[in-house]
Every structure is written in C-alpha cells, then in structure tokens.
Image (cartoon, rainbow, N blue to C red):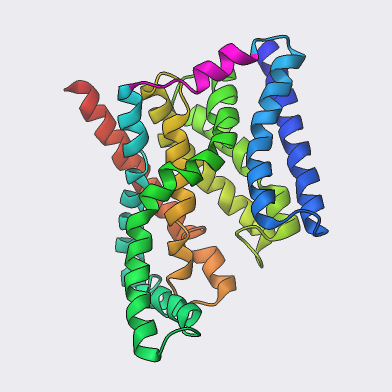
C-alpha cells in the first residue's frame, strides 16, 4: 500500500506540473528550449516533493540514483550505441519500402545553408554536415542531452523503478513505459509535440515507443546498480539521433508521423532491437 500510494502521488504531481508547463507554453509565456528543460526536470521536482511528503531522505535517494563508478562510466558511454544499432535496424527495414531517404535530409540541410553559400558549395556542405551530425550525435547524447534527460530519468528509471521493486523485465517496462509515455500526452495534444497533425493517435504511438525504450533502459540501470546515468545517456541519444527517421523522407508529414520512426516502422524496429538486446545480454550473463 505504501509503494502504491507513493506511485499515485508521484504520477499526479508529475502529470500536473507537466500540464501546467504545457499550458504556459501554449500561450507563449515560456520559450521552447526553456520549456523542454524545465518540463524534463519537473519530474525530478516531483521526486523531491514525494520524498519530502513521505519523510524520506532526499540526499540518500538521489545519491543512489546518481551513483558513479568506473564500470558505470563504460555503461554511460556504451548505452547510446544501442540507439545507433536501432537506427541501423530501422534503416534496413525502411529503405526497401522507400520510407527512408537520406538524400531528403541532405536537401533539407542544403536549403538551410543555401542563403550564405553558392549552389554547389551548399550541396557539398550539406553532405558533410549531414554525416557529421550523425557522428557527433554520440557526443551530444552524453553531454547536453544527457543532462536534460537526467531530469526525467531520476523519476522514471530511478524513483518509480525503485517503487516497482527494481526488477527489470516486461512488467516493469510496461508500467514505467506507459506512465512515461502518457506524461507526454498533454504536450502532444496541446502543443503538437512530435505529432503536429495526428495528435491523439500520436499519444498511443509514442506510449508504445516509450515502453520499448524503457525495456533496455531498465537493463542498463540494473547493470549500473540502480544509477540512472547510463539511462540518461541512452535517452540523450534518442533525442540526438532518432529524429533522423522523421526528416530523412519525402513522405507527407501527416503520413510520416504514422509510418516512420515515431510510428509503425519505429515500433517494429524497436521490437527487433529489444529482442536482439535481450538475446545478447542473456548470452553475456552465461559467459
């Protein structure tokens, strides 16, 4: 009963604060970049409030969630590579269906730089920038993006995971993934976050994806002894590179939202990724 009550209070606080921030942003009172940062860290605020309400140590809990070691550093650096693997799986599935077109991404960059460069220079620069952004996504994932994502991870893969028993698996991934996904619902519906056109369907699609993201995140959290830092770099990598699955296409936007990386193809790619990841981790544990 104690854990259940804490979960209810945590979810209510997290959802309420997020909704308030979304309404503030809807009326233009909060710049987009600041909205994203504050919204992500509002989950940690909910954790602190819960710990205070239930008279638990804020320091000891945060210390556990933010634990650090040499082994953890390796996990922190390696976790984003799983998103690169998922991207490779996605591309291998999407290219035969004409759902991934890297040249469309290059053309998009060329349009952005064309005002300051001649036609051929813009095209060449766009190619370099397109590949450079993919290569540099790892650095972004483990620095700025991880710092942003840490605000959420303290809540979802830290506090909530602890309340659910800290046991990785399908059940925990479903519970945390659904709570995490629905936490985005007000942003999707009110602001068109990730789904500008198909907003209600977007809530269902994104929640499915967050469940699939959560499965490997819980495994790396277990490997890290409860520290959420590797989960934060994982989350940071999603935000750094997974958007390529949306922009590297010539589909209409309304179709892209449903079919591509934040839709059906993304779900399929992450199901495959999770299965391969599970097989790999089982094999490693046996050796």
The residue drawn where x is 36% and y is 55% is 136
Q: Can residue 5 be seen at all in this image of the molecule?
A: yes
The foreground one among 247 and 200 is 247
The answer to whether residue 192 is left or right of residue 147 is: right
**Residue 112, x across and y down, in percent:** 50, 78
Total marks drawn?
0
Q: Main secondary structure of the magenta part?
A: helix
**Residue 102, x across and y down, in percent:** 36, 72
Query: Which quadrant of the rendered structure holds the C terminus?
Result: top left
Q: Can residue 182 be seen at all in this image of the molecule?
A: no
Residue 217, magenta (yes or no)? no
**Residue 30, x across and y down, in percent:** 76, 53
Q: Which residues are magenta?
A: 58-69
User: Does residue 102 lie above or below 162 as drawn?
Assistant: below
The residue drawn where x is 44% and y is 25% is 168
- Dividing the picture into quadrants, the one containing residue 74 is top left
**Residue 260, x across and y down, in percent:** 47, 64
Residue 67, magenta (yes or no)? yes
User: Does residue 118 lie above or below 80 as drawn?
Assistant: below
Query: Which quadrant of the rendered structure holds the N terminus?
Result: top right
- Dividing the picture into quadrants, the one containing residue 195 is bottom right
């Amino acid at each position: 009963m104690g854990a259940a009550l804490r979960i209810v209070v945590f979810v209510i606080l997290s959802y309420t604060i997020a909704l308030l921030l979304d309404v503030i942003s809807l009326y233009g009172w909060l710049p987009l970049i600041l909205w994203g940062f504050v919204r992500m860290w509002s989950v940690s605020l909910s954790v602190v409030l819960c710990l205070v309400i239930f008279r638990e140590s804020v320091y000891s809990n945060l210390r556990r969630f933010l634990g650090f070691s040499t082994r953890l550093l390796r996990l922190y650096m390696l976790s984003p590579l799983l998103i690169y693997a998922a991207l490779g799986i996605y591309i291998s599935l999407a290219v035969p269906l004409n759902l991934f077109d890297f040249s469309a991404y290059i053309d998009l960059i060329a349009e952005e730089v064309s005002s300051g460069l001649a036609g051929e220079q813009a095209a060449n620069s766009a190619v370099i920038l397109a590949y450079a952004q993919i290569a540099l996504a790892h650095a972004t994932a483990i620095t700025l993006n991880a710092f942003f994502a840490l605000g959420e991870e303290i809540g979802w893969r830290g506090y909530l995971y602890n309340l659910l028993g800290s046991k990785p698996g399908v059940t925990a991934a479903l519970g945390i993934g659904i709570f995490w996904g629905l936490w985005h619902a007000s942003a999707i519906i009110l602001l068109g976050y990730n789904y500008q056109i198909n907003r209600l369907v977007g809530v269902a699609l994104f929640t499915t994806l967050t469940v699939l993201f959560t499965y490997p995140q819980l495994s790396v959290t277990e490997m890290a002894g409860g520290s959420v830092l590797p989960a934060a770099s994982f989350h940071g990598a999603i935000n750094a590179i997974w958007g390529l699955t949306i922009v590297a296409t010539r589909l209409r936007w309304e179709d892209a939202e449903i079919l591509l990386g934040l839709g059906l193809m993304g779900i399929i790619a992450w199901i495959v990724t999770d299965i391969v990841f599970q097989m790999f981790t089982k094999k490693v544990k046996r050796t």
